[in-house]
Amino acid sequence: MTLAIQSRDYWDGAVQSYVASAEPFTALFCADAVALAQIESDMHLIDVATGPGALALAAEAKGAEVTAIDFSAAMIDQLRSRAQGRRIDAIQMDGQALDLPDGSFDRACSVFGIPLFPDWRAGLAEMARVLRPGGRAVVATASTPVGFGPYMVLAQARAALFGGSPATLGVEGMAALADEDRLVAEMSDAGFETVEVHQRNHNFAFDIAIFQTAREMLDASPVIADLAEPDRARVIDEAAHMAAESQKDGKLNLDCVAHFATAKR
């Protein structure tokens, strides 16, 4: 079953909230990916699941010619408005079935996108297919199956109210690729070689008002999607209470660790 967070409609509707609340944080990991990609001038790079384009913009600034793809038309529109006059081709495209020739790119990157794909193995295999022999790939995944930021608090709130271990997002790729050994194995099975995993961590400071201002988006989270509506509301309220108890100047600071798999084709 495809979950809401895996749909075009979800991401088309989430552009502005993502840019405001998540991108300042995820852009830090995009910069890490660009550094690990070891970009040289005039290399061709593909950014899979680019979102509003933080990685694409950073890679182009290092001298790459970038093809940035995402299945969300709204995300691609956001990047196109940012990328005017720069060597970035922003294309709406499904990362599970890239309409691109084999061996087209010197570098292939994806930060937090492929684990969300319904067929995440196809996403990895397609990324390997379009990378030229000897090319370098960088794939970033969250080290927790619930992702980062507010979702971490939602999972803790659900566990506090209903018992058991903190909930997961229920997204197979996120659960699988949060495990370092599994990430290496799946990358190898997809056709990559010399897979190594590096950790990078950044502090996610977000406004706790998100539990009030983005209730509709949080209500659709797979962390709580299986609960009845009154229980989902209870979890969001409990998350808001937890965040308020730990906040400083209206923000909650969470240390977040990501896995970066680097590999060759």
Image (cartoon, rainbow, N blue to C red):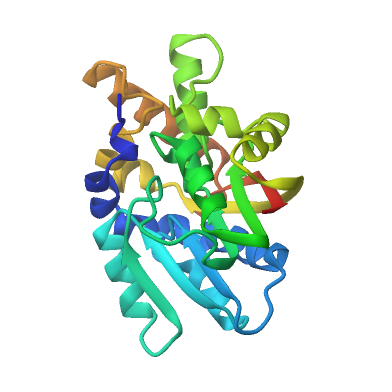
Task: Give the mark count.
Answer: 0
The location of residue 16, given as percent across then percent down, is 30, 60
Q: Residue at x 37, y 28 (%)?
A: 222
Q: In the orientation shown, which residue stands out farthest toward the top?
A: 163
Which percent across, then down, holds residue 130? Answer: 51, 58
Q: Can residue 39 be seen in this view?
A: yes
Q: Position of residue 44 (x, y in %)?
A: 55, 74
Residue 19 visible in the shown view: no
Where's the C terminus, which quadrant?
bottom right
Look at 32% across and 76% down and name the residue there: 80
**Observer-nearest of 250 and 28:** 28
Which residue is found at the position 72% from the left and 70% from the top?
Answer: 38
Q: In which quarter of the image is the N terminus?
A: top left
153 relative to 189 in the view: left or right:
left
Task: Give the percent coordinates (x, y) of residue 110.
Answer: 53, 55
Front position in the image: 77 or 135: 135
- Outermost residue, bottom direction? 85
Q: In this view, does 195 lie above or below 171?
A: below
In the image, what residue occupies the spot 55% across and 69% down? 45
Q: In this view, does 75 lie above or below 6?
A: below
Q: In which quarter of the image is residue 12?
A: bottom left
Q: Measured along the vertical axis of the image, is residue 247 above or below residue 24?
A: above
Q: Is residue 158 left or right of residue 245?
A: left
Question: In terms of image quadrants, where is residue 211?
Answer: top left
Instruction: Return the residue nearer the eye: 120 or 125.
Output: 125
